[in-house]
């Protein structure tokens, strides 16, 4: 089980800037280990986010996104107290969801 | 003799098999766009997405450092003030995996996304917008990398 995502959502006017740090190896499938064997690709493919239950973000990623991925986006019409829930799914089918409150 | 019960049973089995293989349309649309992530050029990306040939545009903005100290974590962003945008994407021209990320654009979020990508070597980074009318617009920026980020 991976570490929880760190989600910070700060309101500015009527929008909220959401910054997320996810915990994931994001293995490209290009690297070889010390024995010369290729380390299999293991990376987040889909990221979705909901604002008070409503889907607001949908993204597809490839293995070029850095390890422990960072993501920043801005939700419109948001206010303090709103809920932001983020979910990722990787190429092995593993998935993780975390939630934060807009501050 | 082939009766209705057998036909229905066989159809169900075939559908389950096809669903497992991701061949049914509903499944295919929800799945990760493997074809898009295999492209090596913007022209190939346009084809994979059913878009017209990519056209450079000042309305699509790519942000990133001029020089990246560490190719493993290069902060890059894509944004646009245009409306009618379906997706915003980030490409790293010289990466083995060229398409790094694709973001769906909708009314609930600003058309602006930032992430960090791995860059194997100095390369152009492209911000690409796929419009609702299937036009493809892009801008690019050269990012120099002092220490490549693909590991090994």
Image (cartoon, coloured by chain):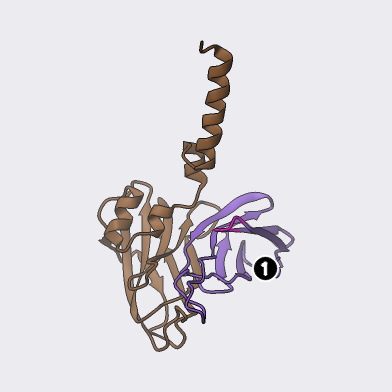
Image quarter of residue B99: bottom left
Residue A37 lies left or right of residue B84; in this view the side is: right
Which percent across, then down, holds residue A19?
Answer: 61, 70
Element carrying mark 1: loop
Q: Which residues are magenta?
A: A89-93
**Residue B75 falls within the magenta-colored stretch:** no
Secondary structure predominantly adopted by residues drawn in magenta? loop
The number of callouts visible is 1
Which percent across, then down, holds residue A8?
Answer: 67, 70
Which percent across, then down, holds residue B122?
Answer: 34, 81
- Which residue is drawn at the image coordinates 56% and 27% (left, top)? B12
- Dot 1 corresponds to which residue? A5
Residue A21 in sight from this viewpoint: no
Residue B46 in sight from this viewpoint: yes
Letter of the chain in brown? B
Of residues A44 and A74, which is closer to you in this image? A44
Q: Is residue B21 above or below residue B59?
A: above
Q: Quadrant of the C terminus of chain A?
A: bottom right
Q: Is residue A103 above or below residue B149?
A: above
Q: Quadrant of the N terminus of chain A?
A: bottom right
Q: Could you classify mark 1 by the number of other residues whose Cα lies within 10 Å: few (under 14), some (14-19), or many (20 or more)?
A: many
Q: Is residue B73 above or below residue B49?
A: below
Letter of the chain in purple? A
Of residues A7 and A3, which is closer to you in this image? A3
Residue B108 lies left or right of residue A95; in this view the side is: left
Which percent across, then down, holds residue B128?
Answer: 36, 62
């Amino acid at each position: 089980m991976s570490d929880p995502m760190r989600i910070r959502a700060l309101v500015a006017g009527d929008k909220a800037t959401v910054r997320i740090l996810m915990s994931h190896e994001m293995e490209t499938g290009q690297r070889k280990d010390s024995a010369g064997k290729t380390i299999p690709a293991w990376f987040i493919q889909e990221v979705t986010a909901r604002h008070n239950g409503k889907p607001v973000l949908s993204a597809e990623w490839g293995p070029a996104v850095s390890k422990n991925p960072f993501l920043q986006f801005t939700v419109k019409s948001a206010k303090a107290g709103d809920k932001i829930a983020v979910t990722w799914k990787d190429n092995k089918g593993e998935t993780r969801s975390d939630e934060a409150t807009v501050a | 003799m082939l009766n209705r019960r057998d036909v229905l049973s066989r159809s169900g089995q075939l559908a389950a098999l096809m669903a497992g293989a991701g061949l049914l349309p509903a499944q295919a649309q929800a799945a990760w766009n493997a074809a898009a992530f295999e492209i090596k050029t913007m022209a190939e990306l346009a084809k994979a997405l059913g878009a017209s040939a990519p056209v450079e545009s000042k309305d699509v903005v790519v942000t990133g450092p001029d020089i990246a100290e560490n190719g493993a974590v290069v902060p890059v962003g894509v944004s646009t003030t245009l409306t009618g945008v379906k997706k915003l994407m980030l490409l790293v021209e010289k990466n083995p995996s060229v398409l790094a990320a694709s973001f769906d654009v909708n009314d609930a979020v600003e058309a602006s996304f930032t992430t960090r990508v791995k860059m194997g070597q100095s390369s152009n980074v492209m911000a690409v917008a796929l419009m609702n009318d299937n036009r493809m617009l892009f801008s690019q920026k050269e990012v120099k990398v002092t220490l490549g980020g693909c590991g090994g």
